Amino acid sequence: MKIVNVELYNRTAYFDGIGSRTGRRLRRHFRFHPDKYQYMPKYRDGKWDGWITMLKRDRATGGYKVNSGLFLALQESIERKEKIKFAIQDMREFVRFNDDNILSDRIYQNLCIRAMQRERSGGLILSATASGKTLIAGLYFKALIGTGCFVVDELTLLEQAREALSEVIGEEVGKVGEQVFNPKRITVATIQTLHLHKDRADFKSWMDALNVVIIDELHIALNRRNIETVKAAKPHIVFGLTATLELQKEMVRIPAYALCGPTLFEYHQEEGTEEGFLAPGIVCAVKVIQEGLLGSYHPEYQDLITESDVRNDCIVGLVKESIDRGRHVVVIVERVAHLRRLSKMVGEIPHKTVFGEKKTQERIMAKKGFERGEIRLIICNKVFKKGVDIKIIDTIIECSALSSKNDAIQKFGRGKRTKAAKDGLIYIDINDRSPFRSTRDSDDWNRFHKASKSRLAAFRRRNVPITIVNWDDNPEEVLDIAEAKLQRYIRKLRRNTKNVVFH
């Protein structure tokens, strides 16, 4: 068995004295094809093989190096497959924590914090939406002797995270964003601001002194901007927080491990629901049948989704019926044009629209007004996926027609927060379908049929209860069926988990 010597530092692993042959063997484990690489000009012109390789030559020594997190995540797999043994000289520095017994009242959060405290390079925290990832970060930072930065991807989330962390830590939390540079021991920053100013002297001095970086909503942070920014900061430890991450996909797994490290802790929606920390929720798939147009994607999306009378009438009917029943409704769309169309159609119902073009303060006010019950309808687009904390939501109507399983689970999780007098969540998925007996080769095949089934498959894998209803212009029937399904699920939870209390 070949022995490969490794010098392991907090952020980089160096392979000592390996030749080009061993380098080639290792390289195939530390590479991935980016999404849609086969359509990229360099690949199509034969100027690139389609691989992004994370194993690099070290100019100083002429050897090889790779991100520590990626090495640690793949170490055992590589040893097994290549029949080699890594002899590791661990040179990583520890960060220190105070001796105070800083604990949560939830066992899973304490387990997560302990796992984080043991780490010297970082890793992934896969914890369900509404399970308290910001609280976990706050308790970790509270115990940390040193400096830390909590990175968000949205200006709307900057103050929300800063306020939440300050309450947990018990000290003023700094702010870097919205043209403010006011770092403290613990700071909340937007990734956009960090990337924009990473070469500025005062930014660089502060970033160089960071011990720990925690990246929120990692599933939307796996891009070159974030990777370059973290590389420039050079913290000892990097953690990534997310509810879902498609680690089975090479193009997700490799960059995630490289940015943060291996998976350290998992706590999924099923566990949170069974233990009473997350509200029970069901999916009601409302099948809307439309003939396809055999056109390209964007025109079909416009005709069958954004401007479809039958589909939009279904959405508006469900909104009105939900509001009549006293429910608190969030409608999620993909395109701003769709959002504006629906806003006009429900014009007589007091509501707010939330999307990227809205000023941050407007979006914050809309959220607070909804939480206070001043309005009971928000129509929003994808900004809703990014850490929005609204406990009162009990009805989500998802209208985006996207195929992403991650996207579906993230949106569902936004309604899982608990609140007094909230029974649970009804998540209505507008489920596009082709006419009966239509096939992919048929002239009337609806391209969004496949995406609808993909989303339902994601929910089934997470054991989310699903009821499927055909749309026949009867929103009362849909809500009756959905509410009955939710109540049956709640009764089942209480039977299976005695004395469960939804917190």
Image (cartoon, helix red, strand yellow):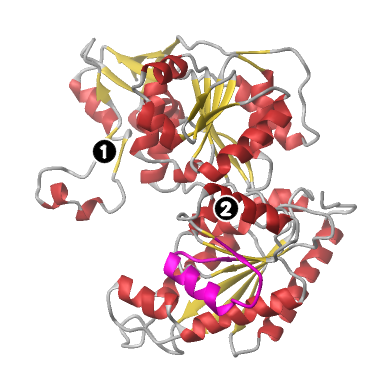
Element marked by disc 1 = strand
Mark 1 and mark 2 in contact? Answer it, CB < 8 Å: no
Element marked by disc 2 = helix
Left or right of residue 8, residue 43 in this image: left
Nearer to us: label 1 or label 2 = 2
Instruction: Report the residue at 31% width, 71% height from top.
Output: 297
For the record, the magenta segment spans 331-353
Is 13 drawn above or below residue 129 in the view shown?
above
Q: Is residue 259 visible?
A: yes
Is 53 drawn above or below residue 65 in the view shown?
below
Which residue position is annotated with label 2?
A: 363
Give the quarter of the figure containing the N terminus: top left
Which residue position is annotated with label 1?
A: 52
Left or right of residue 469, residue 63 in this image: left
Instruction: Report the residue at 69% width, 27% height from top.
Output: 139
**Residue farthest right in this picture:** 499
Residue 100 percent coordinates (x, y): 77, 15
Badge 1: how crowded within 10 Å, few (<14), some, or many (20+)?
A: some
Instruction: Report the residue at 55% width, 45% height from top.
Output: 156
Q: Amino acid at mark 2?
A: Arg
Residue 308 percent coordinates (x, y): 44, 82
Q: CA distance from mark 1 to mark 2?
A: 38 Å
